[in-house]
Amino acid sequence: MRLVASSVSLVTACDDAGEWHGMAVTSAGSLSMSPPSMMVAVNRTASIHPVIMRSGRFTINLMDESHAALLEPFARSDMRDRRFEVDDWVEAGSSGPVLKGALCSHVCSVSETHDFGTHTVFFGTVDDVILPQDIARSPAPILWLNGRRVSVATPQTI
């Protein structure tokens, strides 16, 4: 599966004390248009796992190349305290932080969970979709391929 290019998202949530939590994932995606829903697989040892379980909410922020510097802190647990240092975040109420300028942010309420192997798959009903102000700009999603970040040239219609 290392040879399957996947988009990178930052999954974020807010705990009972109002603290923000997040992690980088390639295991998030759309699930259904009716009802609008998303899914994300989270390792049960990840620090955000119990936060999503308790709060019943998560946000999937699809990363843009302009946010590449955020990837390392969100991918490494030893850099957890640096994840929200930069001013790239806005508060989304009980859903926690939303990444400014993300290609798209899906604010979700957990509707179902399913444990499989080491992970829990969270199925979320989309409560809100946040798009960048400059929706006409060319998207430059961050992709993960063969264990590293790769850039995408301006997409062309085929």
Image (cartoon, rainbow, N blue to C red):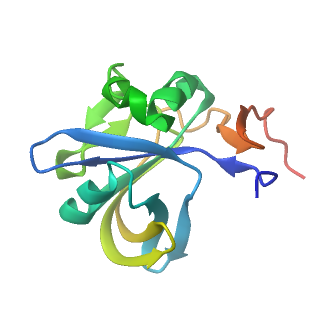
Q: Going 44% across and 59% down the picture, which residue do you hit?
A: 42
Q: What is the count of numbered marks?
A: 0
Say whether residue 18 is left or right of residue 95: left
Position of residue 90 relative to residue 11, above or below, is above
Q: Nearer the viewer, residue 45 or 147?
A: 45
Position of residue 58 relative to residue 110, above or below, is above
Q: Quadrant of the N terminus?
A: bottom right
Residue 32: x and y in percent read: 52, 76
Q: Name the quadrant containing residue 114.
A: bottom left
Say whether residue 89 is left or right of residue 155: left
Q: Name the quadrant containing residue 125.
A: bottom left
Q: Going 69% across and 51% down the picture, which residue do you hit?
A: 6
Residue 98: x and y in percent read: 34, 40
Q: Going 54% across and 41% down the picture, which residue do you hit?
A: 103
Q: Going 64% across and 47% down the picture, which residue do you hit?
A: 7
Residue extending furthest toward the right: 158
Say whether residue 68 is left or right of residue 6: left
Residue extending furthest toward the left: 17
Residue 139: x and y in percent read: 65, 37
Position of residue 21 relative to residue 90, above or below, is below
Residue 23: x and y in percent read: 43, 43
